Image (cartoon, grey):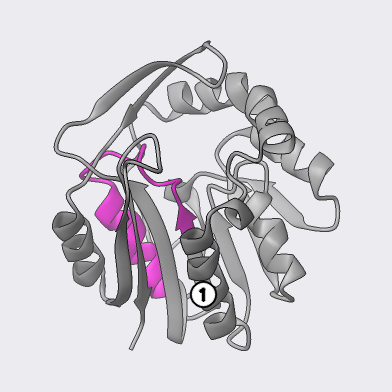
């Protein structure tokens, strides 16, 4: 029985269908070009490593919006009890193919049935930016509720003042989704309002990354 209801985004089905269309292309790009491979980005890898070191003894970890499972698999290699979920069945199909040793399932961030204080850590690794601005705080509250004392939440998002409507992605595939951008101070404020304390954060250099991005690690005190 669900005890924490979250509003369903109006564009949920359209977003799911869009990610299904790009899933194979994206997974191929991961394998052939290393896109999404944190090993190629020292600060991103350091952030994930610090997260793994901190939550490793706290219990299960959930990778929300895991895509083809790159970060999920990396955390599993680090010895964590981790599983991944994604809105897109196509992404999950690729994740299971590429990382058969890991656990993956299809689920939206807005429809997770998470027990209170059941997780040592939650990731929303560049996977929450499609959530409408009125829905994201509800999802963050769900994640915080699921964290054990001392548990950590790590996330990254696109930085900016205006939202971006995407009509094609990953090789020119037609898509329809909104990338909701956040100012770093706004994003941190949302995380604090959800009930966790940010312990680290950084805006990534747009000269290195194609679009301004930023990440935050937060701890449940």
Q: Nearer the viewer, residue 3 or 98?
A: 98
Q: Residues within 10 Å of mark 1 (few under 14, many from 20)?
A: many
Q: Position of residue 5 (x, y in %)?
A: 36, 55
Q: Is residue 140 above or below residue 172?
A: below
139 inside magenta stretch: yes
Q: Which span is picked out in magenta?
A: 123-145
- Looking at the rendered structure, the secondary structure element under dot 1 is helix
Q: Give the side of residue 195 with respect to residue 108, left or right.
A: left
Q: Is residue 164 above or below residue 2?
A: above
Determine the residue positioned at 66% across, 23% down. Answer: 25
Tell me how many marks there are. Answer: 1
Q: Nearer the viewer, residue 182 or 128?
A: 182
Q: In this orientation, does residue 1 appear?
A: no
Q: Position of residue 61 (x, y in %)?
A: 59, 70
198 inside magenta stretch: no
Q: In this orientation, does residue 199 appear?
A: yes
Q: Image quarter for residue 156?
A: bottom left
- In which quadrant will I find the C terminus? bottom left
Q: Give the side of residue 144 with respect to residue 83, left or right.
A: left
Q: Position of residue 20 (x, y in %)?
A: 60, 24
Q: Give the side of residue 25 with respect to residue 116, left or right.
A: right
Q: Position of residue 85 (x, y in %)?
A: 61, 50
Determine the residue positioned at 85% across, 57% down. Answer: 101
Residue position for label 1: 51
Determine the residue positioned at 27% across, 38% down. Answer: 132
Q: Image quarter for residue 179?
A: top left
């Amino acid at each position: 029985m669900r005890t924490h209801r979250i509003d369903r985004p109006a564009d949920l089905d359209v977003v799911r269908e869009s990610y299904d269309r790009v899933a194979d292309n994206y997974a191929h790009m991961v394998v052939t070009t290393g896109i999404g491979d944190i090993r190629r980005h020292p600060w991103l890898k350091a952030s994930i490593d610090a997260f793994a070191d901190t939550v490793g003894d706290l219990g299960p970890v959930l990778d929300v919006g895991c895509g083809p499972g790159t970060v999920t698999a990396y955390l599993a290699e680090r010895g964590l009890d981790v599983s991944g979920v994604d809105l897109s069945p196509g992404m999950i199909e690729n994740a299971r193919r590429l990382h058969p040793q890991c656990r993956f399932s299809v689920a939206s961030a807005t429809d997770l049935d998470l027990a209170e204080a059941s997780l040592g850590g939650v990731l929303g690794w560049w996977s929450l930016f499609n959530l409408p601005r009125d829905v994201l705080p509800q999802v963050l509250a769900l994640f915080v509720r699921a964290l054990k004392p001392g548990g950590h939440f790590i996330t990254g998002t696109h930085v900016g003042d205006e939202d971006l409507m995407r009509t094609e992605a990953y090789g020119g595939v037609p898509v329809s989704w909104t990338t909701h951008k956040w100012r770093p101070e706004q994003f941190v404020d949302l995380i604090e309002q959800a009930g966790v304390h940010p312990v680290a954060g950084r805006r990534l250099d747009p000269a290195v990354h194609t679009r301004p991005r930023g990440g935050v690690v937060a701890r449940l005190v």
